[in-house]
């Protein structure tokens, strides 16, 4: 044990923490494609790898733009108690009541999703394939983030309750360990979303309501696990990293009644629904006959810069969101 503690002290490395984790975001966009109708599948299925790979671009952008972070979360509990009626749902009303600085500081994910949805709808109207794919990949990220309980809590990484690390544990460790063999992502067909803001706020309220359960159940389970059973050391990218143990992870997943799987399934359905809705609202353009089928030089340079910033630049904005 002394040797393990020694190794942990000197070799323990932090893993970059992302919204849902890269793996989960990629899985959400990937499986959302299979919910689409054939008329959309002709575009989305051949580009499924792009939609999956670039689902994480908004997280990479957080290494270049400080203003990116608030687009991923909303500390809705800062506005009172559930169902948070003190916070107006309309942007103009919210900033008039609380000021734009306050709203930005507490996160803007529901409003940002509405902006991205309109951009995607416009891209369909323009029949611009490059924009459709890029915006589809990225809006999938923000929609998925709205389904994470700790993205709707000011105690977003358990920093107020001595539970630091719970953010990455819930959204990265659990799906990475369990999704492949235990989660079921075959859901059905994409549904039209008649009221995008109302639907988005419903998902945010669900997340906010679940945040206390996420934190409370982890704390209770921790009391039953000594440290050497709660954590384990694993090799990642050739380095020894302390991680939540398989035993603790599976036990926690059982305690929260497969919440991560349920929220991932809801996120997949939501992403497909938003894509489908944007296409419908744009007049159902023929996706076999589009313009701008190749990414521009500017697009390609942006992708390269995102990767470079992600690898070589410090995170800008709030951590763990």
Image: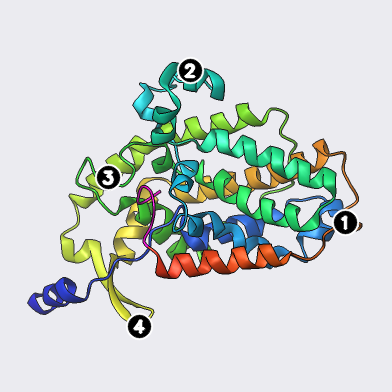
For label 3, the crowd category at 10 Å Cα-Cα, with few meaning under 14, some 14 to 19 and many 20 or more, is: some
Q: Earlier in the sequence, mark 1 or mark 4?
A: 4
Q: Earlier in the sequence, mark 3 or mark 1?
A: 3
Task: Tell me the residue at 29%/54% (across/down).
Answer: 165
Q: Earlier in the sequence, mark 3 or mark 4?
A: 3
Disc 3 marks which residue? 158
The answer to whether residue 183 is seen in the rendering is no
| Residue 290, disc | 1
Disc 4 marks which residue? 238
Q: CA distance from mark 3 to mark 2?
A: 31 Å
Relative vertical location of residue 148 with respect to residue 312 in this rendering, above or below: above
Disc 2 marks which residue? 96
- Label 2 or label 1, whichever lies nearer to me, is 2
Q: CA distance from mark 2 to mark 4?
A: 51 Å
Q: How many marks?
A: 4
The answer to whether residue 266 is seen in the rendering is yes
In the rendering, at what x and y percent does residue 2 appear? 7, 76
Looking at the image, do the residues carrying marks 3 and 4 touch, with CB atoms under 8 Å apart?
no
Q: SS at mark 4? A: loop
Magenta segment range? 314-321
In the rendering, at what x and y percent does residue 42 appear? 84, 59
In the rendering, at what x and y percent does residue 177 appear? 43, 65
For label 4, the crowd category at 10 Å Cα-Cα, with few meaning under 14, some 14 to 19 and many 20 or more, is: few
Magenta-colored stretch includes residue 320: yes
Q: Work out whether residue 249 or residue 90 is closer to the camera in this orientation and state it.
A: 90
Residue 288 appears left or right of 204: right
For label 2, the crowd category at 10 Å Cα-Cα, with few meaning under 14, some 14 to 19 and many 20 or more, is: few
- Label 2 or label 4, whichever lies nearer to me, is 2
Q: SS at mark 1? A: loop
């Amino acid at each position: 044990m002394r040797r393990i503690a020694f190794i942990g002290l000197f070799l323990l490395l932090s893993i970059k923490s992302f919204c849902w984790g890269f793996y989960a975001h990629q899985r959400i966009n990937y499986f959302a494609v299979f919910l689409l109708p054939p008329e959309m599948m002709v575009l989305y299925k051949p580009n499924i790898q792009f939609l999956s790979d670039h689902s994480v671009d908004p997280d990479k952008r957080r290494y270049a733009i400080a203003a990116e972070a608030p687009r991923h979360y909303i500390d809705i509990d800062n506005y009172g108690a559930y169902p948070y009626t003190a916070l107006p749902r309309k942007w103009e009303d919210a900033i008039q009541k609380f000021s734009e600085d306050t709203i930005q500081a507490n996160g803007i994910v529901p409003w940002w999703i509405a902006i991205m949805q309109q951009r995607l709808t416009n891209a369909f109207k323009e029949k611009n394939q490059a924009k459709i794919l890029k915006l589809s990949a990225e809006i999938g990220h923000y929609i998925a983030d709205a389904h994470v309980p700790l993205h709707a809590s000011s105690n977003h990484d358990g920093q107020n309750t001595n539970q630091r690390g719970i953010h990455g544990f819930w959204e990265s460790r659990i799906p990475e360990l369990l999704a492949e063999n235990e989660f079921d992502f075959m859901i059905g067909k994409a549904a039209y979303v008649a009221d995008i803001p109302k639907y988005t706020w419903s998902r945010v309220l669900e997340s906010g309501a679940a945040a206390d359960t996420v934190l409370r159940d982890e704390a209770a389970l921790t009391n039953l696990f000594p440290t050497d059973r709660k954590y384990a050391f694993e090799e990642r990218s050739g380095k020894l990293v302390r991680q939540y143990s398989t035993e603790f992870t599976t036990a926690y997943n059982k305690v929260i009644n497969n919440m991560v799987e349920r929220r991932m399934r809801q996120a997949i359905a939501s992403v497909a629904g938003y894509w489908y809705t944007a296409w419908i609202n744009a007049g159902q353009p023929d996706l076999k006959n589009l313009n701008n089928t190749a990414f521009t030089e500017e697009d390609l340079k942006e992708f390269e810069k995102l990767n470079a910033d992600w690898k070589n630049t410090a995170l800008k904005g709030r951590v763990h969101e």
